[in-house]
């Protein structure tokens, strides 16, 4: 049976261009085609069509007129019902997990960057085939292979096609099995001496724990899962898909042969793996009701990213602790970083996490010098709401684990609303807790974390946050480039002194500096000082008086209380097993 089919070719990888041929059987007389403007999981319009060129259409060797409707849509004027064949090129030189890449060593693409939608026929099966590859290259993807066809795959519809990234190249690959599901791990760009077996073993522990979390002893909702990791000099990120994830990490953070300790970088990588794998359930299957059917041509709004990203961010590091990949003290150190990051964000008093979720399309992915003053991250504050809700539920002999499984059972196929979450919290923890959750989500007040953590057998102490951070500054510093202000936090000593993003800092009390923290050698704690800077080519001197909001000057440190009360010990045991 003739199907909508894409053939992806790499005629000259060094030019960073894919060649795509799309065949549409029995087209409409005026057949509309469109390229997505965004990719699910990354909530920003990315305008993939800006990289599409040389679009042509033919039927039976005869050219068809193409009329462009807007920046992402075209109409082909067809002659009868013979197959419509479109050909075009896509420039691919974006190193992120969201788009496409091609050079003479590696290829990667999300179908949303390469594959035009055949409008009106998105529900039909779609097949994809990749042409001849350079010598030594392989393909990795979670798509279902077409029997008897080389480098060809079949998807039930366009949504499924869009949800399967593809890795191309000469990469390392390994696999393991958990709960009857095969898991493949592909790594491109690793240094010699990379310990692939350790990465597989540690990832397997995470996958086994998360499958058990959602399903107990039952099988997961997929037969095969693929991790696609690109190791680079500097980079970090991930994007979830229904049966795979695309990851980017620093190659120095990969485990090394003969190295038994877990570096901070490796723990960060494991946390990323844990985060994206948890999304297999929390957002890819249990999803906002607004996401049951994606519209790839415009923003798809929801106020629930605090749940889908924030709660996933809570569980990512928690699963490292639950599986023994880190211990409880190291987990609390990671948690304290999140708390301090939120407390040092003035925007938490300006924007709620529900508003941050809705505004993701024009704020979260477009940060600037004012971002921390005007917005709050639904990832980090959302994860603290999850922590607080978990501790409150455990104080009532329930848990966030039970809540997540209840929501999965009831809403995995119907889509989730905030009312559904509040109803489940009411059922497990009471109407008063549901009202508190609504206030945490829609309010801008401080979260009552201190009391909740203390009641869980966790000791809170305060320590200095570092001089530059205490002043409310974020800087770019280098021995050659000098010291430049990137951000000034509202309510800080730097803001009161009149510093601005873009200022170049030259001297403190007349002494030349390359790093602002060097001035601690001669400025006493709490002492006012003169700061000489350049702003728009003019020398300025400002007087800075340290002090101000505690969120800038003091940081929280979390440790296990040595002899907690019996109730706190029991709660902590259930939460951390410690």
Image: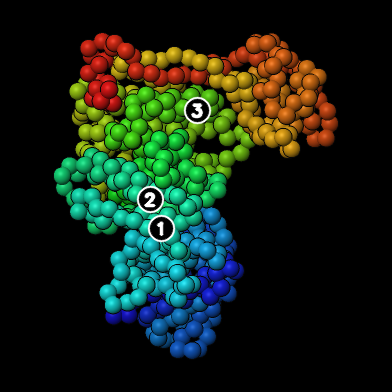
Task: Give the secondary structure at mark 2.
Answer: helix
**Sequence-first tag of 2 and 1:** 1
x then y, percent, for residue 545: 69, 14
Task: Give the secondary structure at mark 1.
Answer: strand
Check disc 3 and report the residue beneath it: 341
Q: Is residue 526 visible to us here?
A: yes
x then y, percent, for residue 250: 50, 45
Numbered tag placed on residue 196 in the rendering: 2
Which residue occupies the extreme left position in the image? 217
Disc 2 and disc 1 in contact, CB within 8 angstroms:
yes
Q: Quadrant of residue 436?
A: top left
Relative placement, left or right, of 225 versus 67 is left
As rendered, which of 120 and 40 lies closer to the eye?
40
Disc 2 and disc 3 in contact, CB within 8 angstroms:
no
Check disc 1 and report the residue beneath it: 172
Numbered tag placed on residue 30 in the rendering: none
Q: Which of marks 1 and 3 is in front?
A: 1
Quadrant containing the C terminus in the rendered view: top left
State the CA–CA distance, disc 2 to disc 1. 8 Å
Q: In which quarter of the image is residue 425?
A: top left
- Taking the spot 32% from the left edge, 77% from the top edge, the residue there is 149
Relative placement, left or right, of 464 versus 487 is left
Q: Check disc 1: other Cα within 10 Å, few if <14, some if 14-19, many if 20+.
A: some
Q: Check disc 3: other Cα within 10 Å, few if <14, some if 14-19, many if 20+.
A: some
Relative placement, left or right, of 146 versus 98 is left
Disc 1 and disc 3 in contact, CB within 8 angstroms:
no
């Amino acid at each position: 049976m003739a199907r909508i089919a894409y053939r992806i070719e790499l005629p000259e990888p060094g030019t960073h261009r894919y060649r795509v041929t799309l065949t549409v059987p029995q087209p409409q007389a005026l057949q509309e085609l469109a390229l997505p403007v965004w990719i699910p999981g990354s909530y920003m319009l990315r305008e993939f069509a800006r990289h599409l060129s040389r679009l042509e259409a033919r039927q039976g060797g005869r050219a068809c007129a193409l009329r462009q409707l807007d920046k992402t849509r075209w109409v082909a004027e067809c002659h009868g019902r013979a197959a419509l064949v479109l050909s075009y090129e896509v420039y691919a030189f974006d190193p992120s997990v969201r788009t496409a890449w091609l050079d003479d060593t590696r290829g990667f693409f999300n179908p949303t960057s390469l594959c035009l939608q055949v409008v009106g026929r998105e529900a039909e099966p779609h097949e994809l085939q990749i042409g001849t590859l350079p010598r030594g290259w392989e393909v990795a993807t979670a798509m279902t292979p077409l029997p008897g066809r080389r480098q060809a795959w079949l998807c039930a519809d366009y949504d499924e096609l869009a949800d399967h990234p593809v890795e191309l190249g000469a990469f390392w690959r390994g696999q393991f099995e958990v709960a009857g599901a095969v898991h493949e791990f592909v790594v491109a760009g690793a240094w010699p001496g990379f310990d692939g077996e350790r990465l597989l073993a540690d990832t397997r522990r995470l996958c086994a724990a998360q499958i058990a979390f959602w399903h107990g002893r039952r099988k997961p909702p997929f037969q095969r899962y693929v991790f696609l990791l690109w190791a680079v000099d500097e980079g970090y990120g991930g994007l979830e898909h229904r049966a795979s994830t695309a990851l980017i990490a620093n190659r120095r953070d990969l485990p090394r042969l003969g190295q038994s300790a877990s570096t901070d970088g490796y723990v960060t990588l494991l946390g990323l793996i844990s985060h994206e794998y948890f999304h297999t359930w929390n957002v890819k299957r249990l999803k906002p009701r607004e996401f049951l059917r994606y519209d790839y041509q415009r923003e798809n709004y929801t106020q629930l990213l605090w749940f889908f990203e924030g709660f996933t961010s809570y569980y990512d590091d928690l699963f490292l602790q639950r599986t023994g990949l880190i211990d409880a003290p190291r987990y609390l150190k990671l948690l304290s970083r999140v708390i301090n990051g939120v407390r040092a964000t003035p925007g938490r008093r300006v924007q709620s996490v529900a508003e941050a979720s809705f505004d993701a399309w024009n704020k979260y992915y477009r940060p600037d010098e004012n971002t921390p003053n005007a917005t709050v991250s639904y990832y980090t504050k959302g994860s603290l709401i999850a922590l607080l809700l978990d501790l409150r539920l455990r104080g009532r002999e329930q848990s966030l684990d039970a809540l997540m499984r209840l929501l999965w059972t009831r809403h995995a196929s119907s889509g989730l609303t905030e009312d559904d979450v509040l109803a489940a919290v009411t059922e497990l923890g009471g109407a008063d807790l549901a009202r508190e959750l609504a206030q945490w989500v829609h309010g801008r007040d401080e979260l009552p974390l201190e009391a909740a953590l203390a009641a869980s057998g966790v000791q809170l102490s305060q320590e200095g946050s570092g001089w530059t951070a205490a002043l409310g500054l974020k800087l770019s510093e280098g021995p050659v480039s000098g010291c430049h202000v990137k951000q000034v936090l509202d309510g800080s000593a730097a803001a009161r002194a009149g510093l601005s993003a873009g200022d170049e800092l030259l001297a403190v009390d007349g002494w030349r500096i390359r790093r602002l923290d060097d001035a601690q050698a001669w400025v006493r704690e709490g002492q006012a000082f003169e700061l000489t800077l350049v702003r728009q080519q003019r020398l300025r001197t400002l007087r800075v008086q340290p002090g101000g909001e505690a969120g800038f000057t003091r940081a929280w440190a979390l440790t296990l209380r040595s002899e907690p009360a019996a109730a706190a010990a029991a709660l902590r045991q259930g939460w951390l097993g410690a």
